[in-house]
Image: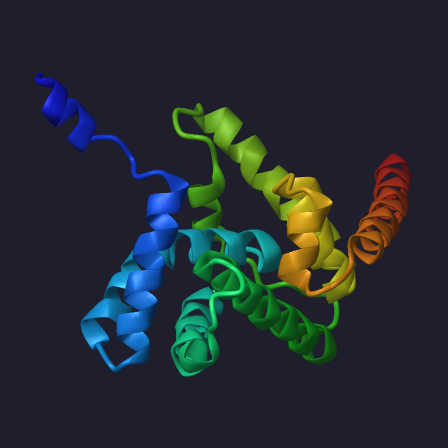
Amino acid sequence: MTRASTVSLRRPSPAAEAAEDERLVAAAAGGDRRAFADLYRRHLDSVYARLTRVIGPTPERDDLVQQIFLDVYRALRRFRGEARFSTFLHRIVINVAAEHLERRRRGMGRNERVDAGQLESLIAPGASPEQRARQREELRRLFALLERLSPKRRTAFVLVAVECLPLEEAASLLDANPAAVKQRVLEARRELAVALERVAEERST
């Protein structure tokens, strides 16, 4: 393999990715539908992955992804580049996810409709049948516990404790200050610890 071909296979740097996003955003804001389609393809996987981590592998995800990109399209003319497009996009992801969690909390109580088939996509590849069964059960328990949290605590907990984002980055996505995000995460941890104790007590009886 030549040096030229090796270089061509390298993933673009974050700065190059951001510059390409800016170019596509400017074109899409001017009405170029192909540019917006390119933005959609570039960011679909990351949007889908983060949405899944926040709300769980539920059947509503596909509709919510379409809503997110529709909201992005409508907001492009207001995007002024104060932050990277990816930050702008994922703020919308978090807002849509939080609104969905709030609606679900009001309308469905504590029952989360987990798509059992979609749990498979969250299981580590190469796992044995026994490992897959155990991981499926652990994931069901995890999402059942997360359902106990308020949308604000849940989104903060997922971003900081699950995705391991720095507080400042999570705060930017949540449109909150880092101290408030830290407090939400601490409250979520305490609430989950209590829930785990109750589950353990129920199993021991």
Q: Position of residue 12 (x, y in %)?
A: 30, 39
Count of picture labels: 0
Colour setting: rainbow
Q: Which residue, as the protein is rendered here, is positioned at the far top? A: 1
Q: In this view, does 80 lie to the left or right of 41?
A: right
Q: Is residue 203 left or right of residue 16?
A: right
Residue 34 visible here: yes
Above or below for 19 versus 74: above
Q: Is residue 158 left or right of residue 12?
A: right
Q: In this view, does 83 lie to the left or right of 77?
A: right
Q: Which residue, as the protein is rendered here, is positioned at the far left? A: 2
Q: Where is residue 72 in the image (x, y as percent from the top left)?
A: 43, 74
Q: Residue, x 64% and y 75% (percent of image)?
A: 99
Q: In which quadrant is the C terminus drawn? A: top right
| Front-lying residue, 201 or 158 | 158
| Front-lying residue, 17 or 74 | 17
Above or below for 34 versus 106: above
Q: Residue, x 60% and y 56% (percent of image)?
A: 54
Q: Residue, x 83% and y 45% (percent of image)?
A: 189
Residue 40 visible here: no
Above or below for 8 versus 140: above
Q: Position of residue 105 (x, y in %)?
A: 72, 73
Above or below for 46 versus 31: above
Q: Residue, x 37% and y 56% (percent of image)?
A: 43
Q: Where is residue 85 in the image (x, y as percent from the top left)?
A: 44, 61
